Image (cartoon, helix red, strand yellow):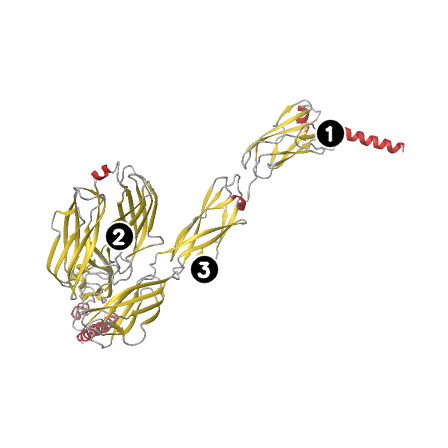
Amino acid sequence: MKLRNRFVTMLMAGIVASASLSPVGGSLFAQQVEEGVNSESMSISGSPVTKQLEKGDQFNLFIDVYTTKSVDELRKSMQYIELEGSTTHSVDVQGVQIIEKENTKTIVVMDLVYNGTGKMVDIEIGFKDGSKGAKGSITLENAQSTLTASMGLTLSENVLNVVAGETQQITLTVKNNSKAYVEAGTMELKIKDPKSAKGIQLKKKKIDLSAMDKGAQKEYYVSVEIDKDVTRGIHEMEVKIGEAIHTVKLKVDSNFMPPSLEVAVNKTSAFEQNVPKTVEVSIKNVGHVAAKNVKLEIVPNEKVFVANGSNVRHVENIESGKTQVVPISLAVGDTSSANLPVELKLSYINDLGETQTSSQFIYLSSKGSVVQKELEMLTTVEPIGIKKVGDNFNVGFKVTAPDEAKNVKISVKAPDGIVSKSKSIFIEPKLTAGQSKSYQVTFVATQGVTTGTYPIEIVAEYMLNGKEVAINTYTTVSIEHAKENTEEKTKGKPKVIIGTYSSNPVVVKAGESFDLSIGFLNTHHNKTVKNLKANLTVKEQGEKDTGSVFTPVNASNTFYISELTPGQTEIKNIQLYTIPSAKPKTYEITLEMEYEDEKGEAITATEHFGIPVEQVTKLEVAEVKVETVEVGTPTELTANIYNTGKTGISNVRIKTIGEGFKVEDNTMIIGNLEQGSSKTYMPTLIPEQSGTLTGQIEIEYEEITGQVQTYHYDFQLEVSESMPNIDDQFNMNEMPMEEEKSGQGFVILGIILGVGAAAGVTTLVLKKWKRRLEEMNRDED
């Protein structure tokens, strides 16, 4: 019992002794180290590092060593200091600074670098006497650990615009929006729904991401191949960074015009009463993608009816550039009118799966009548900017007669208060087929005009196919009344006008899109307008009533402005598409506006402006033929010139240019080349050198707008060397007679070969002449 009590007493004494050697007041644990040979018990600790740390930042450690040794003894006894964990460092024990305190020695380790891992530095001090090392740890309280890529990186998820039918590069922007350093990682890419996005191919499926400091960003590039048949619209791409998944939207647009159907009708003349006759309705897809499930409906009326079969015809699909001809047997019950209208309705499904419809009229003529085309008018000079009362401005326009027109009255009409200072009515007794004439009228705004935008109408009146018709086009002018604006400083309702407008391009081409900018101007000097709504409309239809001339692209035709302060101009932009069948003229656009004054009273106003449209002019050179000939031998070049555009051209000049040959009958001049017509051009070429010669057919012409265009078509001419004169090469009288017999053998052989060559050349020449005679005979037939 006494022995047991003695053992317990000794054990408790040991525990008390151990406790007395532990550090007091340290925030971290101090570890008792086993005593070695000739070594005292030693422990280490240290206060936490409170400095804000990120990867790469420097910090200092203050290591408290609990020992009775002096500073010199401690320095001499240490063999190493190793640091692990949030920093990795092997300390030179001879170079560290040691600060002496009462019962401790503090080792100061300077300029350590935080490696971004964890918040703990493990310390071990080894001694030369072989005793076990002293160990401890110090906390880095405010260290920000490095994040993984999925935790720290974000991906910019803006919509990326791409184009069908092209291979293009998209940019993925990766950002480190965290408060820490982010480690390197990977980014994996795939199309979210391969079925709906069939035809979109990513050239790279995996990208290595570099490590990033906080706040940094980097761009990565990916090539994307998009088939031309990919559906327009939004397709989603999934991007995986580590374990985080992001979605990127690809907005697929198209360089290709959507399906658009043009209708032309043949055999519409010479109808007799109640005698069925077949007309040919040609439906051409002028778009760049197929029109599907095309349906044609003929709407009967009291004068025209379908003679055989149903009035609805299913055409199925029409590919891009293709034409389907639908024969329809029609009969007329009344031939008293020269022109009998028949409505055609078309419907089809576009590349987005949407059903599109359109309606237009064709005209049948009774026997003996001739259907003539109406006049074409195009504005050539329009008033630019805002005109003040008393300012002169000009309106210019051009009138073209596709067919002969007689007794044409042309009037330029302006609203009240805008008067002409020059002749504004023109009488043309006769305009011959293809003739064009230009006119210009000067106007001035008087005091009776209020501030606003006003339409100016150009009207041509004459008899067309037995009926009185009025063909019109428009332009607009913006007027500012200075006196009126001065009076509005203290009274009157605020007024909003179109202060400016512009289109890009200025002259819009049919079948193409254009950008329209409209500036809404509050003309009042001290009154604000609110809640302005403006609706853009075009009342005119395309040729043969094929629908509204201008259609908004991916947008509404309504604008909204919450507030317009006095004198403020707000610009609104819209993209419009011009239908392919739009006639070349200036179309009036109407803006109907509703807004409120400061008291909330409703105000309405209407503004007008004009957009000039021209048809696409297109020439094609086809069926170019030129024979392979010898130097100096004349040959005829044959080329057919086609006007495949939507409008006629004039003052056409055709010639051939190039080097290595001369040209006879070179220049050909054509007054007018109407839509769909062609001419044959046949100059004579005389080669002056052998080889492959390159030439150009140059066509210069004038569009309906008066602008001169030049078109070039390249061709090649193969020319061989001319054959030598056989008599000159083999003159028997000049042959030496005193050669050795062996030499005579070669001479005789040369003569035989020469005669054979001459016979071959003669045969070739005869065959060539025979072939030319056969071609001439075929032409005569």
Of the numbered discs 3 and 2, the one sitting upstream in the chain is 3
The answer to whether the residue labelled 3 contacts the one labelled 2, judged by CB atoms less than 8 Å apart, is: no
The residue type indicated by label 1 comes to: Ser
Residue 70 image offset from top left, x and y in percent:
68, 23
Q: Going by the image, does 662 lie left or right of 12? A: left
| Residue, far right | 1
Q: Going by the image, does 287 lie left or right of 583? A: right
C-alpha span from label 3 to label 2: 39 Å
Q: Quadrant of residue 554?
A: bottom left
Report the quarter where the N terminus lies.
top right
Residue under numbered circle 3: 196
Of the numbered discs 3 and 1, the one sitting upstream in the chain is 1
**Residue 514 or 184: which is nearer the viewer?**
514
The answer to whether the residue labelled 3 contacts the one labelled 1, judged by CB atoms less than 8 Å apart, is: no
Query: Looking at the image, can residue 606 be seen?
Result: yes
Residue 682 image offset from top left, x and y in percent:
18, 65
Question: Of discs 3 and 2, which sits in the foreground?
Answer: 2
Residue shown at the point (14%, 49%) measured from the top left: 441
Query: Looking at the image, can residue 702 be seen?
Result: no
Report crowding for label 1: few under 14, some 14 to 19, many 20 or more residues within 10 A (C-alpha).
Answer: some
| Residue, far left | 429
Residue under numbered circle 1: 41
Question: Of discs 3 and 1, which sits in the foreground?
Answer: 3
Q: Which mark is residue 589?
A: 2
* Above-or-below relation of 272 to 501: below
Of the numbered discs 2 and 1, the one sitting upstream in the chain is 1
The answer to whether the residue labelled 2 contacts the one labelled 1, judged by CB atoms less than 8 Å apart, is: no
Residue 501 image offset from top left, x and y in percent:
27, 47
